[in-house]
Amino acid sequence: MAAPTAKRQPPDRTARATRRLRAGLAIVLILLVILGARLFQLQGLDTAGMAQAAVDKRLRTVDLPALRGEILDANNKVLARSVQRFDIVVDQRLVEDYTRFDPIRQESEDIKIADAIAELAGILGQDAKTVTKAVTGDKPFNYVAKSVTPEVQQKIDDLAFPGLSAQATTTRNYPAGAVAGAVVGFMRSDGVPLEGIEASQNDVLSGTPGTKTYEIGADGIRIPVGTNEEVPAVNGQSVRLTLNTDIQWYAQEVIAETVKDYGAEYGTVVVLNAKTGDLIALADSTTVDPNDPGATPDGDRQSMAVTRAFEPGSTTKMITMAAAIEEGITTPASRYTIPPKYTVNGQTFQDATPHGTLTRTTAGIFAQSLNTGTTMISQQLTRQQRYDYLRKFGIGQGFDIGIGGATPGLLAAPETWDGRQEFTVMFGQGLAQTALHTAVAFGTIANNGVLMQPRLIDAYIDPDGTEHEVPAKKGSRAVSKKTANKVQDMLETNPKYHSGKAGNIEDYRIGVKTGTAEAPSASGGFSGYTISMAGIAPMEDPEFVVVATIQRPQGGVLTLTAGPTFKKVMTQVLNAYNVPPSTSKRVDLPLE
């Protein structure tokens, strides 16, 4: 039997298989060529690029915060400062046993993570369980400790703990606490400045942050010999104020005690250097502690001495007398017959204390604080003149002293005054001003008729100690020196006359004027009174102004006085600046 013949594939099927095989081989060869070319490009031609890419993956860049500038008082006592601190954070995924180089033994050692945690706990002053909970897990970011000192941070850095790093930050603190707290201001928990110098001078205080770039290994540990680049931060400038914190503290204590004794709503004390405009104290009965601003109600976190306007009352009569003397309408010795009531243009005025017909000099009208006599004198001034002189003494003006919230008060244009307001503004009603405005007005008379703009910022200080003084602004003349001197004599005569006696200071020549006005009610009308005493000293060469103001004290208005508060603070000021007791005779103008 013949052997079977093998079955042949059809020629077309064999050819197709061959072609597929060849195509597959061609594709593989092409891919190999492409891959080889790419490998050659990367390894032979772009080694630097590959190396840089690897480095970039290992680089970490952290911000270096600038140290915020200090806020200082006039004697360079620190009111606010920033200290450098570090937040310790961890990538829990990298925490494991590791090898650490010992620089003393000059060799590496294997570290169990449990031992490293015990070391870390000891440095932080925490128990090991707390630290273990913080560093173990799968979180890429977790806080281990906040606001540690640079010394503690360095000890932690020496551990070379895997996944652990330090984030630079700063902490703001206020060594003087509530002393000048409303002036200094404070910071929000996230570092945003709020109120006072902190807010208004933020651009100066902040400085410019820097950066630090370094390499870490796969285990999260910094590579000692790797990239280490730093753009240093530029610290902020410090701001020196004109405030004297010793006077500020004393004034705050005195006004707080007065408000408590009088059951008053609030009180303020302003101390001003009339010759320079320097604010020595801006004291409120309630003030914020910048270390704990939340403990103070929102409405009491700004300086009430510059943010709250009120009708000043009879302290404004000082401006009226200066205007009338300057215009040649009267002299301190001019005599007037004062009726129990005085009517002009259909408006009737009377005094706080009923009286019969009186004969008084201009000095006597001022000393006895007669609204009737003041109206008689002021009616000889035109409406525009009355307005202009109030403005010349700073009333209705906004003073930029470097803190927010300051109000210009309220002085309506003369053409809007009605028949009564055109006269009441001359004895401190129908207008509103702050205690600062009162101080500036009295400072103008003390400075021989020249108004100096109030000044709170004395200098900016670079981190290297270079000082940039903020010069006092050029003064503006309100009245002549001759007129100012005559008004000074009238002020000095006042302490011998009833209400002014409470401010009299033994062994010193001083000049004072009291003020009383109804306090407006939030619901309309009036509720209670605002009382004040403003004065200057020493009268031989007036330099210091003190204004004490008390809002809504409880009791009979005719028996209440801000005199004791004024007296205590002015005495402290004269002693603090070593002003010798007066040796010359006091001025005593005739009152009748």
Image (cartoon, rainbow, N blue to C red):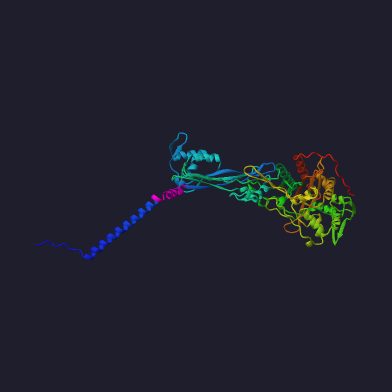
In the displayed structure, does residue 326 sit left or right of residue 38? Answer: right
Residue lying furthest front in this view? Answer: 45
Quarter of the image that includes the N terminus: bottom left
Closer-to-camera residue (126/170): 170
On the image, the x and y values in percent for residue 540 come to 82, 43
Above or below, comparing residue 347 to residue 366 in the picture? below
Residue lying furthest left in this view? Answer: 1
In the displayed structure, does residue 213 sit left or right of residue 471? Answer: left
On the image, the x and y values in percent for residue 314 come to 81, 52
From where the camera sits, is residue 127 visible? Answer: no
User: What secondary structure characterizes most of the magenta part?
Assistant: helix
On the image, the x and y values in percent for residue 56 come to 46, 49
Question: Residue 49 magenta-drawn?
Answer: yes
Above or below, comparing residue 49 to residue 24 in the picture? above
Read off the magenta span: 44-58
Question: Residue 304 magenta-drawn?
Answer: no
Q: Name the residue: 41% across, 49% down.
A: 47
In the displayed structure, does residue 512 sit left or right of residue 285? Answer: right
Q: Quadrant of residue 525?
A: bottom right
Above or below, comparing residue 278 to residue 391 in the picture? above
Q: Name the residue: 79% across, 62% down.
A: 415
Above or below, comparing residue 282 to residue 421 in the picture? above
From where the camera sits, is residue 51 visible? Answer: yes
On the image, the x and y values in percent for residue 322 come to 83, 52
Closer-to-camera residue (337/558): 337
Q: Name the residue: 48% across, 41% down.
A: 129
